[in-house]
Image (cartoon, rainbow, N blue to C red):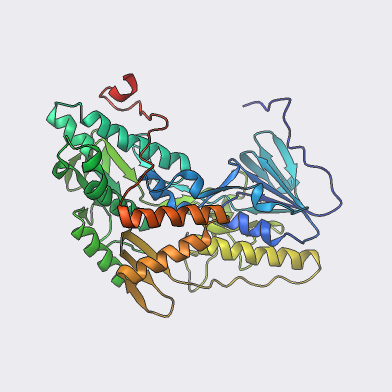
Amino acid sequence: MPIPQHLSLAIPESSLPRIVIVGGGFGGLNLAKGLRKTKAQVVLLDKNNFHTFQPLLYQVATAGLEPDSIAGPLRKAFDGQANYLFRMVKVTGVHPSKNEIETTVGSLSYDYLVMANGSVTNYFNKKDFRPKVLPLKRIVHALDLRSHILQNFEQAVMTKDEKELEKMMNIVVVGGGPTGVEVSGALAELKKHILPKDYPDLDFSQMKIHLIEGSDRLLNGMSDFAGKEALRYIGKMGINVQLNTFVEDYDGDSVKLNSGYIESATVIWSAGVRGNVVDGLDARSVERSRILVDEFNRVKGTENIFAIGDVAMMQSDKFPSGHPMVAPVAIQQGRHLANNLRRKISGSEFIPFKYFDKGSMATIGKNKAVVDMPNGMHFRGFMAWIIWMFVHIMYLIGFRNKLITLNNWIWSYFTYDKGTRLIIRTFNRKFLRRPAAINKI
């Protein structure tokens, strides 16, 4: 696509070293903040002008929160930071030999480049049904999923065909990690407490929520205790769990599994992610869709290119496949690299990165959560749920977001009401064979 002639990055020339950060996620955000008082020009590039708190996307998708509760403008995050510049562009490539990156509005030179562009949904090369399933990786995905689910129920009350009704009321969640478990639990609470009041003319005993997991347990990245407790909670909430089960195909109406078929118009894909690698890096620097880095987060084979967060693979004896692709890793690597770049600019040596595991957690519903602590302790139930809430509130960007989210959770706790059940813009997939009746009303 040709670059519009009236647009350019318009980055002013500077005698200071230029640090270009690609991606405003957890890693990029904390890196840029850590460079606040550094004698350098810090340029942050992202295709969105906001930071998204991805662990709570499922609550936007299930009408628990509005998107502005979990997102904050990147420009506001750096109020008063004199050495900071932001441009909303997509980075399309990198040219290490020229110390340049390519964007949708032109190229930009750098002294130091940091790839912090996170991860994308992993469809495991199943390209045929990729346009037919609903991912949950970005705010637009969450809004699409919310509209899709609500539209299905609006159509269901007007449907006389029993087979079509079954498809509309069945929901399949693929992937038994934290996202899959959390969205399944949220849907189960909607089914029990909210939807029957909104749609009294529907029989919600016909609504089935299926959780499909390819391994023999849930929450594979957590302890056996967490996996077993999550399975117990999920079962008590009436969710149908199928372990050791794989999705082989999906045509928009019927999910083909290695164990049979499920009729469903809604398949939520939370089966995993892969690194979002930009073109131009040496192929030897990339392994399993992640960028190989040394103990300083420096891309192997380079001197001034770094990678942090989900896109980075720092292999070690403790982490032979790299660190887990979770927010705490990105946050710690962003802060650590900021310190190392400050040291580099001042003439000091780099310090190796060491990950401090603060534990992991997942919530299944009200008073239902599991927490693994780094000291080997485990929590479940109400206490784990309180810990989960506190941690997530603390990591949200901005006081306003913390306050709004906490207020929403308190209101929902006592009333079970989710007031954001709004179809702001209708969502329709071209693959659907049945007409989108709701769009014609």
Q: Which quarter shows the C terminus?
A: top left
Can residue 206 be seen?
Answer: yes
Identify the residue shown where x is 27% and y is 47%.
190
Quadrant including the N terminus: top right
Left or right, 418 with reference to 305:
left
Q: Is residue 127 visible?
A: no
Number of numbered tags placed on the structure image: 0
Q: Is residue 22 above or below residue 220?
A: above
Above or below, comparing residue 328 to residue 262 in the picture:
below
Answer left or right for 29 relative to 142.
Answer: right
Vertically, is 203 above or below 5?
A: below
Q: Quadrant of residue 347?
A: bottom right
* 221 lies left or right of 328: left
Point out residue 200 in the picture as x, y percentages from the top left corner: 18, 37
Q: Position of residue 21 (x, y in %)?
A: 66, 51
Q: Quadrant of residue 429?
A: top left
Left or right: residue 175 compared with residue 239: right
Question: Considering depth in this image, is 213 or 11 the residue closer to the camera?
Answer: 11
Q: Position of residue 62 (x, y in %)?
A: 35, 45
In the foreground, 323 or 398: 398
Most extreme residue toward the right is 15
x 27%, y 39%: residue: 249
Residue 331 coordinates in the image, percent (x, y): 57, 62
Residue drawn at x 14%, y 42% as measured from the top left: 206
